[in-house]
Amino acid sequence: MEQLELFLQTLIAGFMLGGLYALIGLGMALVMGVMRVINLAHGDFMMIAMYIAYWLFTLFDIDPYLSVFIAAPALFLFGLAIQKYLLTPVMKVESILPHNLVILTVGLAMVFSNLATVFFTGDYRSTPVSYASNAWYLTDFWSESPIELSLSMPWTLSFVLAVVITIGLWIFLTKTDMGKSIRATSQDVDAALLMGVNVNRVRMMTFGIGMILVAAAGCLFIPIYYLYPALGRQFTNVGFVITVIGGMGSTNGAVIGGLILGIFESMTATYIGMGWAPAGRFAIFVAALVFLPGGIASLIRKGRLGK
Amino acid sequence: MLEIKNIDVFYGDVQVIWDISFNIKQGEIVALIGANGAGKSTTLKTISGILRPKKGEIHFNDIPIHKVEPYKLIEIGLVHVPEARRLFVEMSVEENLDMGSLKGEAKKEREITKQLVFDLFPRLLERRRQLAGTLSGGEQQMLAIGRGLMAKPKLQMFDEPSLGLSPILVKDIFNVIKRIKEEGTTVLIVEQNVKQTLAIADRAYVLENGKIALQGTGAELLSNEHVRTAYLGV
């Protein structure tokens, strides 16, 4: 019974972590799909959002969950500016060195994390919200329950909000013309252009939306995590692994990939050791590359298109 | 309606179109025919702004469209149904149709036009929720044409609409194109299926090695000695 309890608890924790990871992966996958570029500064944008949430909490006592409404628009605008003044000009000379956009994002990541160190020092920071240690217990709802499971309140809040944001994104992508244009552009740029899609505008919007998603992820992570300037790298890794598991540029794949990664990491942490979670991440990354090079998206495609 | 004046087009350093000029008048079906690599698709891509002419001008209803951003052309009434259909395969039939009507007037009348397209192609109505990638070749071509019609174009350009279709389907597609013309849309069609194209075309231009070799009405070219030996094999 204790074993079952441990297993279920691990599974729930993994599922929640996965939901948050999916948000990071979604932003990266959207940008990847439309711009054919892997944004290696993705995690560092998240770090910026987390500092925004941290300072709003520390200076003005604003709840980190509420700072989504400040951090997301701020990063959206910042993303549009980066796209317009840095990515687009570099994209124009793409033919000379095809990977220079990726290199640019690596450069951005370095600049961001080092600037954060200069301004905010390398200290670990967190937002100790008053409800940080609140939790729900299964026995509260079902007193004869043979097993005991618990849900930490901030984790649950973060997970539920991540699900809400993911559903919101799904509605945006399937129901609005802008969302359809984003999907169309990621499937066939030239055809989208012929249908009257302003591809440059779609690229900017996509990058901006990717920033909104990663900013939201940052604000949802900070109540349950800690913050330091170099933290971006770790989450860029997470996003990258999810993008590979999910299939380059696939949003459905990113959600499933995020959940798989969250559960896998949680299992590794429980059954092998806390410090092994990143090793588990890379094990699944290599496994995905070897056994499923097209990612989960290729399985979905096979199921839906029959090829 | 469409006036192409002395255009030269290059792929990198390689010139593929040499000083081509032709025009299309309102209400016509005009065909560009020729062998593989003669420059037919290149000409269409240049008209729709995916490629730019190094020299020469293209005017559509007196607008110099060789200077207009390609995504704006659909709004002024010029739509290009590309070669190999180029559908959004992971979107549903209906979403593909929506993609044809993103702007202005076409967007306002989206549901009405969609009904017209479904009347023209009842198969698409049956499969409206299916992903475009799961359709058969003929259905995909219908969807590509339907997606173009959604823009309510003044001039609709078709690039090899008969490509990869069975003879019966080819006949259907050509009938649809004739019907589109009868309903008031001007048509420019690029084809390798010379016989059937010339049968429906009011006028046609024969492209050879990036130059216009011959021109005339459909009937004239059908009886032309050179066309008969080179393209019809008789």
Image (spheres, coloured by chain):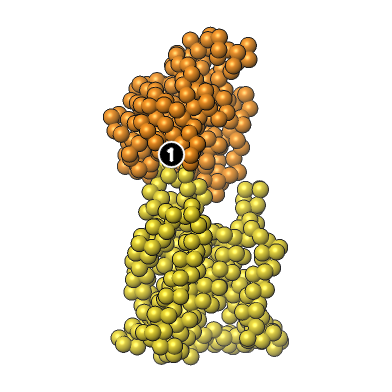
Chain colours: A yellow, B orange
B89 up-or-down from B62: above or below: below
Q: Which residue is mark 1?
A: B51
Q: Is residue A6 left or right of residue A59?
A: right
Which amino acid type is shown beneath numbered disc 1? Leu
Q: Chain of mark 1?
A: B
The percent position of residue A76, horizontal first and vertical second, equals 36, 66
- Left or right of A282? Residue A101 is left
Residue A7 picture quarter: bottom right
Q: How many marks?
A: 1
Which of B206/B88 is in front? Answer: B206
- Give coordinates of residue A120: x percent, y percent: 38, 86
- Tell me if I can see residue A154 in this picture: no
SS label for mark 1:
loop
- Residue at x-position 31% and y-position 42%: B104
Q: Is residue A252 visible?
A: yes
Question: Which residue is found at the position 69% from the left and 68% from the top?
Answer: A287
Q: Quadrant of the C terminus of chain B?
A: top right
Q: Is residue B222 above or below residue A31?
A: above
- Of residues A118 and A9, the one nearer the viewer is A118
